[in-house]
Image (cartoon, rainbow, N blue to C red):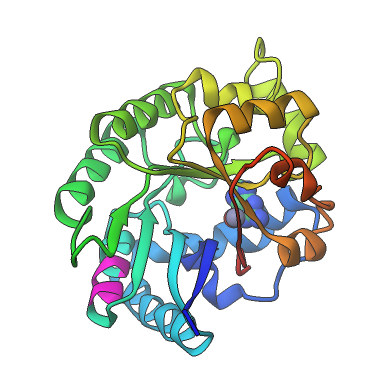
Amino acid sequence: VPGFVDAHVHFPQTRILGSASGPLLPWLERSVFPEEARFAEARYAAAVAWEFCEQLVRHGTTCAAIYSSSHPIAAELLFAELERRGLRGTVGLTLMDRGAPPGLLLAAEPALAACEALVERWHGRDDGRLRFCVTPRFALSCTPALLRGAGALAERHALPVQTHLAENHDEISATARAFPGTADYLEVYEAHGLCGPRSLFAHCIHLSEGAWDRVAGHGAAVAHCPDSNFFLGSGCMPLCAPTSRGVRVGLGTDVG
Ligand code: GUN
Ligand code: ZN
């Protein structure tokens, strides 16, 4: 059989697998952010990169769209481990310059410079098996300047883009407060050049019919994460909304 494709997975959540109990935002603060902060240390990141790739292989997953942490060294070590094993990976440095503990934040300028270096070194490497993916964690963790820079980076190098979209009601309300003047969550990404045929949006549980039309119009794809949605109590993604519009849907584990 062909290998499985995981359309949405967080490498730094390998060791908190099964910790998910919702709702989303308190779980991020309580369980996810403290664990992801550990990836500042290269030895920790290298050990988990090995474990993560080992688990991919054990489960028959040969290709994945992966969020690293916000630390460039962790993304570098993950790319190296994927290459060593011949796995196919689309990997992003998770961009966060607000809304998280200081150890996880990286300001727009150094973050975008680190992305450029990772693109240079890894994008297209190993016969195209490895790709760099522009990865703003979600609108709430990024300032408008960082989102704008991320959109420009994706455009400059024709890179794939991945982020979270409309996963949870509290997240959606907080996004509306953080980006006043935008009509809905998707418009935040549209306004910063992050929507197009190379965009992959995770979850997409609570989108209006009009927003689904726009997702389809952009030619964007969806990473559907049913296990995650169940454990975090985020809701049910209406699968017929994308499929009836010809929007590509992949399955993601989301891991944590
Ligand atoms: N939204 C922003 N970050 C995350 C994450 O790590 N997991 C999930 N499920 N949703 C998110
Ligand atoms: Zn996720």
Residue range corresponding to the magenta coloring: 78-83
Q: Quadrant of residue 46?
A: bottom left
Q: Indicate the quadrant where residue 225 lies.
A: bottom right
Q: Tell me, yes or no, whether the highlighted magenta stretch contains residue 82.
A: yes
Q: On the rendered structure, is 88 left or right of 229? A: left
- The residue lying toward the viewer, choosing from 224 and 12, is 224
Residue 85 in the image, given as x and y percentages of width and height: 28, 82
**Residue 170 magenta-highlighted:** no
Q: Is residue 111 above or below residue 228?
A: above
Q: Nearer the viewer, residue 100 or 183?
A: 183
Residue depicted at 18% across the width and 61% down the height: 125
Quadrant of the rendered image containing residue 186: top right
- Residue at the (63%, 68%) spot, across then down: 256
Query: Residue 38 location, x and y as percent?
Result: 44, 66
Residue sitting farthest toward the top: 181
> For this view, does 71 lie left or right of residue 228?
left
Residue that appears at 37% across and 51% down: 93
Q: Residue furthest left?
A: 120
Dominant secondary-structure state across the stretch colored magenta: helix
Q: How many marks?
A: 0
**Does residue 198 sit above or below 132 in this rendering?**
above
Residue at coordinates 15% horizontally, 54% vertically from top-left? 121
Q: Using residue 184 as the reference point, say whether residue 237 is left or right of it.
A: right
Q: Whole-percent x and y of residue 6? A: 53, 67
